[in-house]
């Protein structure tokens, strides 16, 4: 016999009432049913839980120990039931989002803020990492939803298009190529590249496009964040390709410049991703709707 939540609830009610009869009345079951439940529990735990003193039953030392744990289990289950009820109404709960660097840093803050205002009872956690890392977390159940760049999505996941993105060649304003209206790929031969590491969607899209042109970049530095790449390029340490969304502020400030590269297709999709095995509960649906609303406002998710 396994110990069930029913056993713990009956036991806790007997301890509260100090009587098998009154516990049975409170639980709307027969007194023999209460007695059997307690006996089964004592047999499973191999220890007496109550002793009769006068007309009341009192907890033994083993009973007091069990009550402390049983009370926590019962309370935790009640909290879980309330949380799930709120989750299905999209009023309460916890939403954990995994995102790769570009969408997590530059696209999601606006929609996340709008979602939190509409659902203040929902705790939102955003975890940012490389695309492969985020997808691994999603498959493992460590995050509920993911927003990542283009990737090979396993069959266990459902990926839906969110927005289109384009990688741009970024240069320091002082770089000699910055004076040209456009750049040929041959002009990049021998240039030092500062790139995101393997495993990031940005790196994979770039390498796929360059491989199609038989071009191998001279990588002098790999940096784990887009912000670090921008700082390195701005300091003249090399050139790079980054999302158009990631460099908007630097372009406006004149800290970086972008140039088109002739014949190089660097478009990619950004996707929302969820586990195929889980239903799309209302909480998730409301978050995805907030993302779509952000996309339709001037075609800028922020």
Image: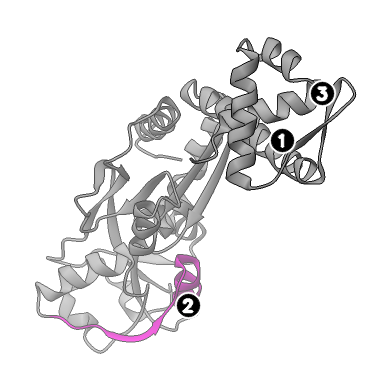
Residue under the image location 21 percent in, 61 percent down: 266
Which residue is nearer to you in this view: 154 or 258?
154
Number of other residues with Cα within 10 Å of mark 3, as a class: few under 14, some 14 to 19, many 20 or more: some
1 vs 2, front mark: 1
Q: CA distance from mark 1 to mark 2?
A: 56 Å
Which residue is nearer to you in this view: 245 or 131?
131
Q: Quadrant of residue 73?
A: top right
Q: Horizontal and vertical percent for residue 103? A: 41, 51
Q: CA distance from mark 2 to mark 3?
A: 72 Å
Where 176 sits versus 228, above or below? below
Can residue 219 be seen here?
yes
* Helix, strand or loop for disc 2: helix
The magenta stretch spans residue 232: yes
1 vs 3, front mark: 3
Name the residue carrying label 1: 71
Name the residue carrying label 2: 232
Left or right of 96? Residue 203 is left
Name the residue carrying label 3: 18
Mark 1 or mark 2, which has the lower sequence index?
Answer: 1
Left or right of 145? Residue 250 is right
Where 169 sits versus 143, above or below? below
Residue under the image location 51 percent in, 44 percent down: 109
Per the rendered image, the range of residues in magenta is: 215-235
Which residue is nearer to you in this view: 148 or 45?
45
Q: Horizontal and vertical percent for residue 270? A: 30, 49
Q: CA distance from mark 1 to mark 3?
A: 16 Å
Residue under the image location 73 percent in, 20 percent down: 20
């Amino acid at each position: 016999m396994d110990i069930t939540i029913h056993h713990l609830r009956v036991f806790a009610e007997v301890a509260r009432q100090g009587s098998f009869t009154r516990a049975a009345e409170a639980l709307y079951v027969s007194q023999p049913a209460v007695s059997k439940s307690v006996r089964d529990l004592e047999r499973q735990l191999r220890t007496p839980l109550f002793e009769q003193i006068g007309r009341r039953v009192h907890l033994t030392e083993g009973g007091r120990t069990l009550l402390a744990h049983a009370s926590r289990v019962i309370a935790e289950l009640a909290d879980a039931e309330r949380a799930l009820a709120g989750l299905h109404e999209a009023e309460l709960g916890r939403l954990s989002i995994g995102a790769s660097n570009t969408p997590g840093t530059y696209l999601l803050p606006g929609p996340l803020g709008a979602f939190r205002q509409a659902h203040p009872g929902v705790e939102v956690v955003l975890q940012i990492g490389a695309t492969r890392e985020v997808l691994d977390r999603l498959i493992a159940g460590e995050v509920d939803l993911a927003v990542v760049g283009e990737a090979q999505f396993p069959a266990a996941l459902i990926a839906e298009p969110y927005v289109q993105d384009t990688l741009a060649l970024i240069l320091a304003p002082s770089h000699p190529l910055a004076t040209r209206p456009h750049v040929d790929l041959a002009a990049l031969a021998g240039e030092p590249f500062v790139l995101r590491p393997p495993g990031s969607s940005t790196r994979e899209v770039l390498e796929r496009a360059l491989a199609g042109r038989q071009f191998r970049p001279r990588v002098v530095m790999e940096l784990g964040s887009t912000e670090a790449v921008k700082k390195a390029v701005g300091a003249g340490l090399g050139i790079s390709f980054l999302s158009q969304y990631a460099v908007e502020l630097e372009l406006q400030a004149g800290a970086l410049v972008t140039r088109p590269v002739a014949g190089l297709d660097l478009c990619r999709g950004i996707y929302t991703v969820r586990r195929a095995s889980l239903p799309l509960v209302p909480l998730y649906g409301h978050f995805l709707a907030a993302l779509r609303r952000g996309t339709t406002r001037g075609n800028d998710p922020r």
